[in-house]
Amino acid sequence: MTTYYSEEHEWITVEGDTATIGITAHAAEQLGDIVFVDQKAEGDEFESGDEIGVIESVKAASEIFAPVDGEIIEANELLQSNPAALNENPEADAWIYKVKLSDPSQLEGLMDLAGYKTFIS
Amino acid sequence: MSDTPKRTALYDLHCALGGKMVDFAGWEMPVQYPMGIMGEHQHCRSKAALFDVSHMGQVLLHGPDAAEKLEALVPAALSTLPEGHARYTFFTNDSGGIMDDLIVANAGDHLFVVVNASMRAQDIPHMKAHLKDIEVTEIFDRALIAVQGPSAQEVVASHCPQAAQLSFMQTCEALIDGTLCRISRLGYTGEDGYEISIPEAEAERITRLMLDHPDCAPAGLGARDSLRLEAGLCLYGNDITPETSPVEAGLSWAIQKRRREEGGFPGAARILAQLEHGAARKLVGIMPQGRAPARAGVEIHDLEGKAIGQITSGGFGPTVQAPVAMGYVHADHSAPGQELHLIIRGKPQPATVCALPFVPQNYKR
């Protein structure tokens, strides 16, 4: 299991050709109190850079951009009943999607944890 | 306007309190503190919140019959406003639109006027050009803070007993810990509270005194916006603009009887006609039925898919615990209970027109 990070402040944890996508604690803190998450449906296909959802905080709406190409195999229902979970636990329970990767080689273009820490500092 | 945002006298205090600073109307202001918008909002509704509103324009009008002369620019009755009282009004343009909203207080030998930060550069020349023989003085050396919430009286009166004697929309000059301040019982949150004009050199000291009270916490522009939205209070530039009239905006209550009879303010022809016959569109409260907030710019459709208006302010209401919005709709779709669709990210979402405010106002009358 390896975790990668995008410049759009997403994390992506990979197991074989499936992966879990979420936003980083840094992103959640920047967004402030999260009140709604607009998620795409299971089966939606996307390319790297596509908007794959919107996070609404008290302040503003922020898009989620796909860090890689793939297909959504599950949207986390927890975020519908409790969007604030994204503030509390964004890098574990409050994941956003499970996805099937189209091209795992794209992961090489993302950052590792050390790289991301440098990126946000 | 210069590119470098200006700083209020409380800038260092905001930073010391962990405020997240943003550029707002050319001013570097705290959007929130570590408590967060939600927490600051709830604190204001349950105890007391302190806002820095020094970016707003404070203006003094000196000269004979200043109130009567100002009536030529606004539709409020001001010449009969008793000393120590304040009134909400707006500058109107010749087509009956709103150029800015403001508070005018009768301070005895002068009028004390507060205008929006973003409109200072328009409003002050506007008054100077039209108020003959009136000295229009923009104040640059006083801070303005707002202490708002059910505990506001306790917080302010613990340093200034006179504050407890004021009713809603009354104002006085009084000492706070030895410094002469102007204290007005009004605000922009729907809660009881005060706005206090303080000489800049004493601003941080007096603000800290207020914050020392266990019920008083600092709050930023984010909470200020969600509080005023729940209270159904208009934001200039969003809900009221040069294209919207006071009647359309639901502000007819601020045009007193004598002014309706006599007119004599810019755009009176259109505004008085709308008062008599009604306006074609109205600003209404709108509650999305789902959880997605509808923000400014979202299109409003009727159930058949016809465009009938636009959201002008919207977000999540922390007290309501649901999304809330305001927007203009055709008058025949403006009755509370009217079902609508809001086009959020291309998809129609069901919503209902509802009476404003979303949260009952809690003024001390």
Image (cartoon, coloured by chain):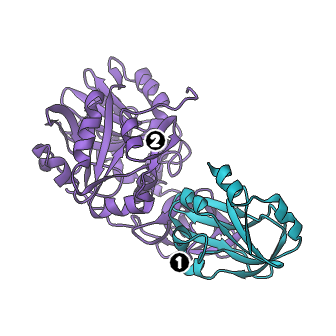
Is residue B231 among what the camera can see?
no
Q: Colour of chain B?
A: purple
Q: Amino acid at mark 2?
A: Met
Q: Tell whether B300 sits left or right of B23.
A: right
Seen as rendered, the residue at the extreme top is B133
Identify the residue at image location x=29%, y=53%. B148
Q: Chain of mark 1?
A: A
Give above or below for A8 relative to B2: below
Which of the 4 image quadrants contains residue A100? bottom right
Q: Amino acid at mark 1?
A: Asn
Q: Nearer the viewer, residue A81 or B90?
A: A81
Question: In x, y percent, where is residue B350?
Answer: 60, 76
The alpha-carbon separation of the residues under discs 1 and 2 comes to 31 Å
The circle drawn on residue B243 is none
Q: Nearer the viewer, residue A97 or B73?
A: A97
Identify the residue at image location x=26%, y=61%. B47
Is residue A14 among what the camera can see?
yes
Give above or below for A113 relative to B219: below
Question: In x, y percent, where is residue A103?
Answer: 89, 70
Which of the 4 image quadrants contains residue A116? bottom right
Q: Colour of chain A?
A: cyan
Q: Nearer the viewer, residue B129 or A46?
A: A46
The circle drawn on residue B29 is 2
The circle drawn on residue A82 is 1
Question: In x, y percent, where is residue B60?
Answer: 30, 27
Give above or below for B360 relative to B145: below
